[in-house]
Amino acid sequence: MTWNETHERIRIIREVEAAAAADMTGALPWREEWSAYFDGPAGLVAALRARWNHMCEAQLDPQDREDRLDDSYGRLRRTQAATLAILRCADATATELLTLTGPRPLPSPTRSRRFHRGPVLPV
């Protein structure tokens, strides 16, 4: 990925965060021209999730006292409430899809799992 593509991705993420802060419903703002950078809405959600994880790693110090850590985490959740709404909505949608479709069937083994010495335990 070039620097120009990286800067464009960052610009898009900031634009999405600003739109989400104005809306706060958790709906993901999406434009088709962004698909070149994120491979669809799921890629944008993954980028937002990675950004949230990086913010937590950068701004929360596990060595802090518990009350200070809680304060920092609460402040981070308040400032990033719009992004968290998008992530919660995406998680709920994924859960609904799994509920509607059911669990994925296990793939068939490519070779026989029977041995001459007894049954094979699942891996």
Image (tube, rainbow, N blue to C red):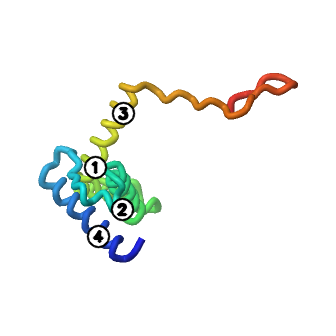
Amino acid at dot 2: Met
Q: Disc 1 designates what residue? A: 84
Mark found first going from the N terminus, 4 or 1: 4
Q: Quadrant of residue 60?
A: bottom left
Local secondary structure at mark 1: helix
The answer to whether one can see residue 68 in this image is no
**Which residue is outermost to the left?**
22
Mark 3, residue position:
95
Q: Is residue 99 visible?
A: yes
Please state, as top left, top right, bottom left or bottom right, where the N terminus lies in the image.
bottom left
Residue 87 in the image: state x and y as whole percent.
31, 47
Q: Earlier in the sequence, mark 2 or mark 3?
A: 2
Which residue corresponds to mark 2? 55
Pick the residue in front: 34 or 91.
34
Spatial CA distance of label 2 from label 3 is 25 Å
Q: Is residue 119 left or right of residue 107?
A: right
**Left or right: 110 as drawn, with respect to 9:** right
Residue at 31 percent across and 36 percent down: it is 92
C-alpha distance separating marks 3 and 1? 16 Å
Residue type at numbered disc 3: Thr
Q: Which class describes the residues within 10 Å of circle 2: few (<14), some (14-19), or many (20+)?
A: few
Q: Which residue is mark 4?
A: 8
In the rendered structure, which amino acid carries the disc numbered 1?
Answer: Leu
